[in-house]
Amino acid sequence: MTFTFDWYGDFLDRLLSHGYRFRGYSDEIESGDVILRHDVDLSPRKSLRTARMEAERGIESTYFFLLTSPFYNVQHKPNREIIARIESLGHDVGLHFSTHQYWNGEPSSPELVERVRSEQRVLVEIAEDPVSAVSFHRPPEWVFRRSFRSFDSTYEERFFTEIAYRGDSNQRWRNEPPLADGTPDRMQVLTHPGLWGEEDASFVERLSALEDETLGRTRRFMEEQFVEKKYNIDEFCDFGEEFEPAAVSQQQQ
């Protein structure tokens, strides 16, 4: 397989051809159901690309944004716009939470819940209707198979061990790539949109390209804001070809 948008589009088509139904974390996961999850570690812009691809096919998924990311700021206007567009395409948005920003070991349950809630309060101010589910970033062992009273975790047993789980972390699929070993009865599929592109590339090459893109936008932003004193941020909200929510609705009917 390749980590390209073409491969991902073909994968979505295969899921549809096998009759899978697309569910969220508030749903009961039954036979024939699949949860599509995206952890946005690196690139909100690429997450909008996969969100459009899914919406074109009438597919809904969940995008988890990392509020403590060193690569992007969710409060930056272009990223707020991306989140709004992803929601307008029918997808869910949730919190991608990094325990490593706060603790080196396992915190007490009250400490964890308070930190999660504090970040969720920030996300509520950005997203229209964020879900309560939480995806842990680079999860420590104590997160796996654990349930929490205050929020759903993507690593609870009902989403992680009781159903098939496939993830592309560091471009290394957990077990096998999805559908490579048959069609699981129920499945959660995790992808990181920042690891995908128009052309196939290694993990290191993808990170290097992302570094160049991010630094390029930062330099342009600094020049326009502080040198040329252009204060209009809208040009940074140009994400390529538009995909109108109305068009999605018409295709789904």
Image (spheres, rainbow, N blue to C red):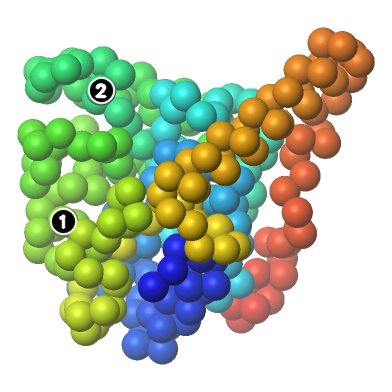
Disc 1 residue type? Phe
The residue carrying mark 1 is: 160
The dot on residue 250 is: none
Q: Is residue 237 visible?
A: yes
Q: Nearer the viewer, residue 42 or 233?
A: 42
| Residue at image point 11% right, 43% down | 144
Q: Residue at x 72, y 48 (%)?
A: 239
Give whichever of 29, 62 is nearer the camera: 62
- Could you say where residue 6 lies in the image, as x and y percent from the top left? 54, 72
In whole angstroms, how far apart are the C-alphas of marks 1 and 2?
A: 21 Å
Question: How many C-alpha atoms fall within 10 Å of the one at disc 2: few (<14), some, or many (≥20)?
Answer: some
In what element is the residue under mark 2?
A: helix
Instruction: For the C terminus, give its image quadrant.
Output: bottom right
Answer with the quarter of the image where residue 22 lies: bottom left
One can see residue 80 in this view: no
- Where's residue 176, x and y in %? 22, 69
Q: Is residue 61 above or below residue 237?
A: below
Q: Are marks 1 and 2 in contact (CB under 8 Å)?
A: no
Mark 1 or 2: the one toward you:
2
Q: Can you tell which mark lies on residue 100?
A: 2
Q: Residue furthest top?
A: 226
Please state the horizontal and vertical placement of residue 231, each as a whole percent of the image. Answer: 85, 19
Could you say which is closer to the camera, residue 203 or residue 7? 203
Secondary structure at numbered mark 1: helix
Residue drawn 48% across the image and 79% down it = 10
